[in-house]
Amino acid sequence: MTKPHRTTALADLLLAWYDRHHRDLPWRVSPPMAARGETPDPYRVWLSEVMLQQTTVQAVKSYFALFTSRWPTVTDLARADNEDVMKSWAGLGYYARARNLKKCAEAVAFGHGGVFPDTEEGLKALPGIGDYTAAAIAAIAFNRHSAVLDGNVERVISRLHAIETPLPAAKPEMRALVAAMTPQDRPGDFAQGMMDLGATICTPRRPACALCPFNAQCRVLGQDDPELYPRKAAKKEKPVRLGAAFVAEDETGAIFLRKRVESGLLGGMTEVPGSQWTARIDGDTGTGAAPFAAAWQACGTVVHVFTHFELRLTVYRSKASRDAAAGEGWWQPRETLDGEALPTVMKKAIKQAIPDAFETARKA
DNA sequence: GAGACGTGGAG
DNA sequence: TCTCCAAGTCT
């Protein structure tokens, strides 16, 4: 079937724009680099795509540098210690990504001879790789003609075609439109170009329509407020959960830590002992959940907002002797606290109890 | 389809 | 202060 002339023209406009205005990113082979003969490394493409899931470019940069420096190949990552991977991911969020990252590296290294599958279908069979990431790796790393649809592309497409169907119901329709637009030549650059366009021009707020290569074809521009697209269902209110966190310090300044269960919220990460964060507002904020008997002293509240609820932790501190602590857990020396797999909410709790906890760690 | 799953930055 | 949200995936 012959593709309509108009869609081909759109791809040409986009690629011309990308050649001129592409972002230079550490994981990217930009057009000038490709002209010099550089080719994408599937490992780096995959790693960056996973890190970028629901995460800003700015936040990803330092983590990408750390991971590629520490584990230059997928086999290096596959052989790494799980704990080291979790520690290196700490702070980036969505920790299931790190657990799946390791599993995926193992599958590629030990199940595929260290070579990534080069098809969407093969990629999607791997842990942590869904529709978007499979299509993105296939297009960017393997030059496959796949329809890459992420949040940026959804925004561009929804405005370009004035799509009234709200997300996520509109996804199949959008994917079909992207597939029809994607050129046989340079599908990877087309995908990256669409994402760059969404990130820098066709932005959620105050889009720079005057600079957009599609402004002559855009169905929304001039008819309606582009910011109203894509249409989305109204979001729900976040419930509040309450809990307690216990920061115990021994004679040497070491802090008592535990490891969370592998699945669920902050799965596999390190924590200070605490109460259950009940689904209701009346969780245990007292010392009933303290890990051991000590002179627990309330020292304020930490508020942390997760994706689907707000957590208010009453923080307690105590000076305890090592013998007092029983049960699972360990005393982490102050100077190595910063290298632990502590999620941000746990760092906040520790700082609330011991304001200079991490400064002490860095100086030591 | 809907809910779980983090965090920090921008307006 | 507060709302939105950034290259989604899994169940």
Image: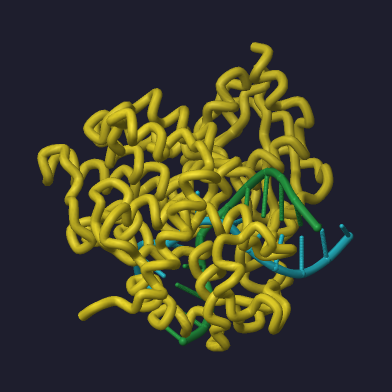
Chain colours: A yellow, B green, C cyan
Residue at image location 30% in from the left, 38% down from the top: A40
Q: Nearer the viewer, residue A235 or A85?
A: A235
Question: Left or right: A108 with respect to A304?
Answer: left
Question: Left or right: A128 with respect to A22?
Answer: left
Which quadrant of the structure image shows residue A171? bottom left
Residue A134 point in image, percent of width and height: 30, 58
Q: Is residue A171 above or below residue A192?
A: below
Residue C7 point in image, percent of width and height: 50, 56
Question: Left or right: A86 with respect to A279?
Answer: left
Q: Nearer the viewer, residue A6 or A60?
A: A6
Q: Is residue A60 above or below residue A215?
A: above
Quarter of the image where the N terminus of chain A is located: bottom left
Residue C9 point in image, percent of width and height: 37, 62
Residue at image location 69% in from the left, 61% down from the top: A210
Residue A34 point in image, percent of width and height: 33, 36
Residue at image location 33% in from the left, 45% down from the top: A46
Residue A326 in view (yes/no): no
Which quadrant of the structure image shows residue A85? top left
Count numbered badges in the picture.
0
Q: Nearer the viewer, residue A202 or A126?
A: A202
Residue lying farthest top? A364
Quarter of the image where the C terminus of chain A is located: top right
Which quadrant of the structure image shows residue A47? top left
Question: Left or right: A256 with respect to A239?
Answer: left
Residue at image location 83% in from the left, 42% down from the top: A299
Residue A277 in view (yes/no): yes
